[in-house]
Structure formats: structure tokens, C-alpha cells
Amino acid sequence: MVNGKKLKKIIIKIFRNHGLTQNHANIVSEALINAELVGAHTHGLARLKMYCDRINKKVINPKPKIKIKKISQSISQIDANNSIGFVAADVGIKQVIKNAKKTGIGLVGIKNSGHYGLSGYYAEQAVKKNLIVFCFTNAPPAIAPYGSRKKLFGTNPICFGAPTSSKIPFILDTSVSEINRGKIRVAAKTGKKIPMGVALDKFGKPTTDAKKALLGVQLPLGGFRGSGLAWMVDILSGVMTGSSHGGKVKDPFDDFSGPQNVGHMFIAMKPNLFVGNFGKRIKKNIRMVKNLPKIKGVDEILYPGQNKFKRYKKNIFKKILIPNNIKKDLKDLNEK
Amino acid sequence: MVNGKKLKKIIIKIFRNHGLTQNHANIVSEALINAELVGAHTHGLARLKMYCDRINKKVINPKPKIKIKKISQSISQIDANNSIGFVAADVGIKQVIKNAKKTGIGLVGIKNSGHYGLSGYYAEQAVKKNLIVFCFTNAPPAIAPYGSRKKLFGTNPICFGAPTSSKIPFILDTSVSEINRGKIRVAAKTGKKIPMGVALDKFGKPTTDAKKALLGVQLPLGGFRGSGLAWMVDILSGVMTGSSHGGKVKDPFDDFSGPQNVGHMFIAMKPNLFVGNFGKRIKKNIRMVKNLPKIKGVDEILYPGQNKFKRYKKNIFKKILIPNNIKKDLKDLNEK
């Protein structure tokens, strides 16, 4: 157990020791701790060692020269120069916010980036500036396209955020696989089974063994529907931005043969472009859904992002529980 | 059986008789016949009588004064004045194409519209002009939000199109319900069963009886994932555009108490904004997916839109088969 402030100092020190500037180390540290606080442990400290390993093996550039190219008042291109994904995404979301505030709609394409953690973390930043936002990113192969028995698409999340006129933003951040790859990874570590129908083993057979699933393929949500959505995200964040795509994004844990070259695309819009009272309208919209009769066992109908916010609020005043293997990572990396 | 040209003339005459201009009758006729040719019979002639009924009951305006308001070079708002949805969407997609061609990105929000048929039909028009495009529309209540036992969201399709450097565009047009409402409607008419797990009856119990499902609720794709996606589409096309939302879009078949007030949102982008060779890159992307090892029984891995295109190509030279009940609709409406 460690408190957030102390943990932040440790993580900053680790990334400073790995060559990041104070500012970049701070960005990475905040993103990783946020993942822990919202309960997305698969996107938090569990990845710390991997990021450091990639810096050591020179496949993440700790001192990137990030180039922002203005295409128009609304549109910017970012070449992240193989920075750690958090830093590229931080620059990207700030730029799309700026563009949208100026013109009503902003579009930013980012290439030569890496895994940036939770899409919702960036969406939230735009929503806090009263914008509607899409965040797309591709990822290493995990899902078999519909009709194939080999993985190619990443779990390619679809992330959408909107202001709600309340403290809790609407943040949908959903992968297009039947379940998250991170959950399979955790099940494999803890020896738990995964549900039937979410993955195939390497021979193309359905499996409930998480380790076999990691060697095999994950299945897309709803067959051709999820497969098509994953393909869409690959086109937007990979093909269009100039990043790797079509299964060529490297796995950050297993493949040190070069930078990941992940791509991201952010689109942001002012909510009041068409009618002037978005705040009132969304409030009414949410109320109408919440007032519906509930199924048995459900106390409240939640909108996307509410659960995560509740976890954050609960965890922010508590110490952060760190599993033993990660404690060891932290100690090793901190003493280096 | 009737050939396409003759059928087009009949439909145009029907809508002319219902007060539409020659141009608007032509737009509606082409959209309905296209739905038949791509095999989406639930979005074709089966709806003809409904549209005419709504005109007769004065809840579709046959002579709309459609207003296009320029928000910026990129952004336009359209008030469709309760036109038939096809006409509103035709104006909208042409406007978003124009805006995107001018500035790189176009955004159009449409309010006071109606059911516009297939989203993919409009996406295709943008893709033919070498644009990447999103088409969002909301719809009358059909899906229960996650946690509720009452329907509120429409089947709210997510539609995405991209050029492919071939004659066949990439058109993903997927509802976010486990199966399409149109399919349940057809099953109800033909007395067939629907699969388990796609719908609840009006008491909140799982059912395979299509008629009971129509009186009950459809289930969202993947629980909270599909529910969140449907909610996203309602925010974009309903809350943001100034249209009905939160379950207030009227059912076109059952509710003649007023116009539907459906909303649409179109976003279009030039594919070469960031890197100059999108055509080559997407071709390679598709090739990489198609070259994957296939599961048993699959001859070819298809991208979204390929199947529909194949059906279109097959049907375009054949006469159109018209079921008896629809033949009667055509005859009645034509003789009026």
C-alpha cells in the first residue's frame, strides 16, 4: 500500500532516470496513476516495466522531437517521433481541443506513437473543456477478423465523450472484442478461467483457458459487427494517419524489434454548434434513461463513465494496493 | 416480378400523387429501389405504404422548405421541415461532401427529418467522391438501455465508409442491437422464430417469438457496449442536432400523432489529409486481412460492403420480386 503522492514521485523518478524530461515523466506518471484509481489495473502499473524495457531497448524514444503540422485551423498532424504514447496523446488531445475551440470542429491524426493507456483519460480532458470527442487508436493484433482464424486487428477501442452538465462526464470507452485483452492477461496471471465464446486457442478452437487464449485469438463483439468496427478504427487511426496498420502494430510486451508505430485519431466538436442548449438537452436525455423501469438486481441505470468515476472517487482518498510482482518492478526500477 | 425501370416509374408516380416534386419523388424512388437491389427488403418497398400514410396524415411534409444554415466553411445545419427522410438525407450528404471537399472536414447536423432508409446508401455517395464518412441517425425506441427492461434507444446504426481503390467501397452499416429490428419484423410477418438472447417480451422475459419481441424490447449488442454505442448515436444525431432524443422519436408505422423528428449527423473527411497515399495504403490493408488463414467453410474474408455490393450486382439485371401484400400496396397507391 502506498499513497498516491509518494507513488507519483517514485514513478516520475523512474522515468526521469530513463531519460524523460520532468514534464514528460509527470504526464506518464499521472496517466498511470489515473488508470490505477479508476480500477483499470491492466493499463496502470502492470505496464511500467514494459515501458522502461522499451526505452532501454531504444524502441521508445525518451527525448522525442514531436512535430505538429498545421493542415488548417481545424486539422493538425502530429509526428510523435516514437515518444511514449502518453506524451503523444497528451500533445494530441491538447491540439484537438485548441482546434475545436477555434473553429467548432477539430481533427488530429497522430503517427509514430505507442500504447497510450486509456482512451477515456484523453476523452475526459476534452469533455472538461466542454467538447464532444472521439478518440481512436489501433493496437497490436488480438482479434481475428470475421471469417479468419488468425488475429490481426487490435482490440481497437471506440471512445466517445460528451459533457453532461454534471461533474461526471459521459465517457464510453469500449473495446470491440467480446472481452478486454487486459482481462484475459489478468486471468492468465491469476490462473482464472475466461468465459466460453470470447476467444479461440492457436488451433482455432474455442477455449476457456486464458493462457491458451493469449496464444490464440480473441473474438470480435457480435461477429461481423465488432470485426467491422475494429477494421474502421484501424483505417482511421492506422491507414489514414500514416501509422502501422493491418496487423503491423508491434506488441509492446513481446516485440522489441522496433517502435510500435501506433496511430491515434482525435475528433472534437463544440456541443452547441447546432442548437444552443446542449447542457439542458443532455441532462434531460440522461434523466429519461435513468427513469426507465430497471431489471431485477439493478439499483440505478448508469451512463458510460459513471462507474469509472465512482471507482475514482472511492480510490482517491485511499492508499493504492500494489501486487507483489509490481512492487518488485517498482523497487528494481527505482534503484537502477 | 417487375423490372427496375418500370418499378421506378410506378413509385415516382405514387409519390407525385402524394404531393412530392418530381425531383423529390425521384430521390425517394431511387433509395427504395436501391434497398431492394442490395437485399435490404425491410428498408425497401415494405415501407412504401407507411410513407404514403404519413403524408396523408400530414406527419410527413411532401413540400418541405428545407433550410441550410452555414455555421462555417466546414459546418452546416439543416432543418428538414419534416420532409421525408430520404430527401433530408440527400440534401445533407451533398452538403457534407461539399464542405469536406472545401476544407478537408465536413460536419452536417440535420433536424426535423424522418426515417431515411439505409445509412450505407448515403455513405456510399460520399465514398464515391473519395471521402471517408460517418453517418449517424437515431430511430424510434427498440433497444432497452443496459440495466433497463423498457426500450428507449433506436437500433441507431453506426455507419462508416471509406474508399478502397476498387469499385467496391468499404461500407460498415451496423445496428447496435443483437439483430436488426427489420429482421424481427420480417420473422413476425412470416411466422418464423428469432434466436434466443436477442430480445425480451413485454414482461422482460427472453423470447424467440418475433411478435412478442416486437411488443417487448431488443437487447443491445454485448450488453453495456452496444447500449453505450446506441446512446452515443442518440447524443450525436438527436441531442446535438436539436431533434427528438431519449426515446421521443416516433415509430413511423404506429404513431401518427406528429412528425417523427428524427435527427442525422454526417461527418466527412478527405482521406489524404495526413499522408498522401491513402489509396495504396488501404489496398494493402485489405490485402493483408484477405490473406489471413480462414476458418472452415469460409471461401473469402470479405470487408464490410462487399456482400451488399455482390447482391446489388446480381440483382441489377434481374426483375424485382415483389411479395403479394406489397403488390397490393403498389396497386392501391398507384390507382389512387
Image (cartoon, coloured by chain):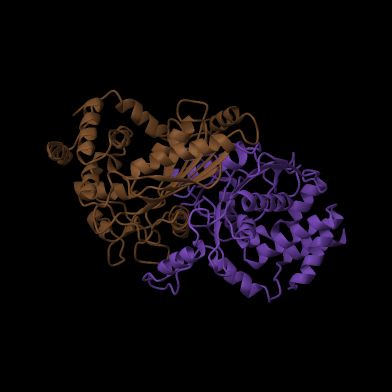
Chain colours: A purple, B brown
Residue at point 34%, 41% (across, down): B86
Residue at point 83%, 53% (across, down): A20
Q: Where is residue B40 in the image (x, y as percent from the top left)?
A: 31, 39
| In the image, residue A109 above or below residue B312 | below
Residue B316, located in which quarter of the rendered image?
top left
Residue B48, located in which quarter of the rendered image?
top left
B104 or B323: nearer the viewer:
B104
| In the image, residue A235 above or below residue A51 | above
Residue at point 46%, 66% (across, down): A286
Which quarter of the rendered picture does the N terminus of chain A lie within?
Answer: bottom right
B279 or A194: nearer the viewer:
B279
Q: Is residue B117 visible?
A: no
Which quarter of the rendered picture does the C terminus of chain A lie within?
Answer: bottom right
Residue A191, located in which quarter of the rendered image?
bottom right
User: How many circles with numbers are drawn on the protein?
Assistant: 0
Q: Position of residue A82 (x, y in %)?
A: 75, 43
B120 or B16: nearer the viewer:
B16
Q: Is residue B271 visible?
A: yes
Q: Position of residue B285 (x, y in %)?
A: 57, 33
Q: Where is residue A40 in the image (x, y as percent from the top left)?
A: 62, 62
For residue A268, side relative to residue B14 (left or right): right
For residue B199, side relative to residue A184 (left or right): left
| In the image, residue A148 above or below residue A26 | above
Residue at point 75%, 61% (across, down): A29
For residue B226, side relative to residue B196 (left or right): right
Q: Residue furthest bottom?
A: A317
A105 or B125: nearer the viewer:
A105
